[in-house]
Image: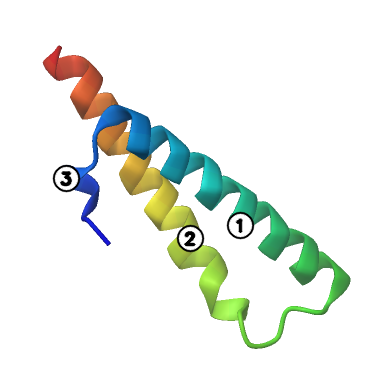
Amino acid sequence: MRTIRELNDKDLKSKIQESRVELSKLKIDAAKGTLRKKSGKLKPTRHDIARMLTRQREMSEEK
């Protein structure tokens, strides 16, 4: 997988969308109480989304 800095704008948007979908599924599982092995994945997923949004903002400021 390429790092966040190496992604272009289109790839970054799709990656953000995928991560948001994954996060929503994790949140639903956590609310139902069926999230056992992946319980430590919520926070890192949120942080990854924040990193990608930060990079997207940086790219828009460079233009």
Of helix, strand and loop, which one carries label 1?
Answer: helix
In the displayed orientation, state which residue is furthest to the right: 32
Viewer-nearest of labels 3 and 2? Answer: 3
Distance from label 3 to label 2 (Cα)?
A: 19 Å
Of helix, strand and loop, which one carries label 3?
Answer: helix
- Residue 57, picture quadrant: top left
In the displayed orientation, state which residue is furthest to the top: 63
- Residue on which the image places disc 2: 45
Distance from label 2 to label 1 (Cα)?
A: 8 Å
Q: Looking at the picture, does residue 41 appear above or below residue 9? A: below
Viewer-nearest of labels 1 and 3? Answer: 3
Report the residue at 48% width, 55% height from top. 46
The answer to which of marks 1 and 3 sits earlier in the sequence is 3
- Residue on which the image places disc 1: 22
Report the residue at 61% width, 57% height from top. 22
User: Would you call the spot at circle 3 few (<14 residues within 10 Å), some (14-19), or many (20 or more)?
Assistant: few
Assess whether mark 1 and mark 2 are in contact (beta carbons under 8 angstroms): yes
The answer to which of marks 2 and 1 sits earlier in the sequence is 1
The answer to which of marks 3 and 2 sits earlier in the sequence is 3
Assess whether mark 2 and mark 3 are in contact (beta carbons under 8 angstroms): no
Q: Looking at the picture, does residue 25 appear above or below residue 50? A: below
Q: Which mark is residue 6?
A: 3
Q: Nearer the viewer, residue 1 or 33?
A: 1
Which amino acid is tagged 2?
Answer: Thr
Report the residue at 25% width, 36% height from top. 55
Which amino acid is tagged 3?
Answer: Glu
In the displayed orientation, state which residue is furthest to the left: 62
- Residue 48, picture quadrant: bottom left
